[in-house]
């Protein structure tokens, strides 16, 4: 049985009366961090004119934002394990607010770039701390259920931010950052008032740097963690490759315009959201392991439909169904695989969350790179990538490990 000791260990419930609000607080805070990366997309032309440059130069700020977002995730994991979830999150939101204010009052492009970097650095805290806090608060099955519906919301809310940004741009591009600043300030106050510390804080701060690196060495050397923490990121390689290649295929091969392309990409978001809600139901009725198998099976099925479409069918509907099923499967896989991976540990859950998040970022980067090499017109190769990643994920959960070695708490 997989990691039964870790999955059934008691959870910390410091203030049950406040816990009900915590997942929503985490969703709103994480959504703000994710939305900040693309809310200003409709304002690119206005910003380019304001900074006396071109839209491509302003667009570089997106990469800068996510560079800050990705680079500091590991740092937040260690901080949250040694100084507490609440303190780390409040620091992160404060940094995010600082970046938003710099962007709001930027008069030069370089100032805006610095603000975007600081924003990304602060925004990373919400994702890492939130994931660890959920594992602290709930049992394993309840964690999977909570992560499932949270993931569904997080796939929808940030995707709507460019629409909101389009309306805000009517008042000027700065309106986007005024909105982010005000909402960030509100969330900072809400987190200060309602975010409950879910982790026993280590009072001994001596040798923190040494223990910081040791904690990550402990996590990454755990075979069970590596196995389950790799499942979702491997699937993300196929998903990102598909997402990256789709616009070129849809517009240049199928002949649809950019508006129709948006609907296709929106289908991936809808599929992911659907899978999240399905995962919440599956884990209640069938448990964590069955939910994980169901998710990977759907990703395999979706990949087969994509391959069949490009080899034999060449039908619009088969392609859409394949994309939808593949994304739904990935969404179902995320909560159980993440929960199992993180719950191998009790004192190092934020560190484990940070590493798991880093794996996903690497998966996205690799998927985008592969799509760039293969090209958007070679969709049969992209479909093959999705089936290969799905089968690798399947092999990871059927691989037999030494239970005693995997379930030992480091």
Image (tube, rainbow, N blue to C red):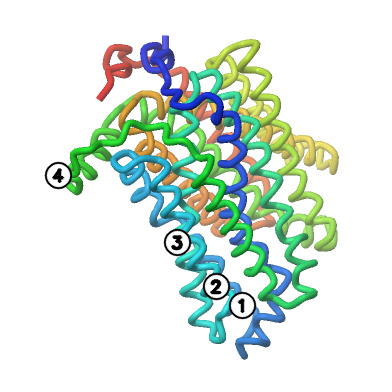
CA distance separating discs 1 and 4:
47 Å
Image vertical order of residue 304 relative to residue 69, above or below: above
CA distance separating discs 4 and 2:
41 Å
Q: Which residue is mark 1?
A: 56
Q: Which residue is mark 3?
A: 95
Mark 1 crowd level (few <14, some 14–19, many ≥20, 10 Å Cα): few
Instruction: Name which of mark 4 and mark 2 comes first in the sequence.
Output: 2
Instruction: Determine which of the numbered discs, if any, sits on residue 255 in the image.
Output: none
Q: Quadrant of residue 78?
A: top left
CA distance separating discs 1 and 3:
26 Å
Percent from the top left, x then y, of residue 345?
33, 26
* Of labels 1 and 4, the one closer to you: 4
Mark 3 vs 4: CB contact within 8 A: no
Q: Which residue is mark 4?
A: 206
Relative horizontal placement of residue 84, taking residue 32 as reference (left or right): left
Q: Quadrant of residue 39?
A: bottom right
């Amino acid at each position: 049985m997989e990691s039964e000791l870790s999955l059934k260990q008691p959870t910390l419930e410091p203030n049950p009366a406040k816990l009900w609000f915590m997942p929503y607080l985490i969703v709103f805070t994480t959504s703000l961090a994710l939305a900040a990366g693309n809310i200003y997309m409709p304002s690119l032309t206005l910003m380019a004119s304001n900074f006396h440059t071109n839209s491509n130069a302003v667009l570089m700020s997106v990469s800068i934002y996510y560079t800050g977002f990705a680079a500091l995730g590991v740092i937040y994991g260690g901080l949250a394990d040694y100084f507490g979830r609440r303190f780390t999150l409040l620091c992160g939101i404060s940094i995010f607010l600082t970046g938003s204010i710099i962007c709001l009052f930027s008069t030069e492009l370089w100032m805006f770039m610095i603000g975007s970097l600081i924003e990304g650095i602060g925004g990373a805290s919400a994702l890492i701390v939130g994931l660890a806090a959920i594992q602290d608060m709930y049992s394993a099955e309840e964690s999977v259920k909570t992560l499932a519906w949270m993931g569904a919301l997080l796939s929808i809310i940030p995707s709507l931010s460019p629409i909101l940004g389009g309306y805000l741009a009517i008042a000027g591009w700065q309106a986007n950052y005024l909105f982010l600043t005000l909402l960030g300030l509100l969330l900072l106050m809400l987190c200060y008032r309602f975010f409950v510390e879910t982790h026993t804080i280590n009072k001994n701060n001596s040798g923190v740097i040494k223990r910081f690196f040791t904690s990550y060495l402990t996590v990454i050397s755990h075979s069970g963690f590596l196995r389950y923490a790799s499942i979702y990121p491997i699937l993300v390689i196929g998903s990102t490759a598909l997402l990256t290649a789709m616009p070129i295929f849809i517009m240049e091969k199928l002949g649809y315009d950019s508006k129709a392309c948006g609907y296709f990409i929106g289908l991936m978001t809808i599929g992911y959201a659907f899978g999240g809600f399905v995962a919440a139901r599956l884990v209640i009725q069938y448990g964590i392991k069955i939910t994980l198998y169901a998710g990977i099976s759907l990703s395999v099925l979706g990949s087969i439909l994509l391959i069949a479409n490009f080899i034999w069918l060449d039908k619009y509907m088969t392609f859409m169904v394949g994309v939808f099923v593949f994304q739904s499967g990935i969404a179902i896989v995320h909560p159980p695989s993440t929960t199992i991976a993180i719950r191998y540990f009790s004192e190092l859950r934020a560190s484990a969350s940070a590493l798991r998040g880093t794996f996903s970022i690497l998966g996205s980067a690799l998927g985008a790179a592969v799509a760039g090499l293969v090209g958007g017109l070679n969709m049969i190769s992209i479909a093959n990538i999705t089936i290969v990643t799905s089968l690798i994920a399947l092999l990871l959960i059927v691989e037999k490990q030494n239970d005693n070695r995997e379930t030992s708490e480091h």
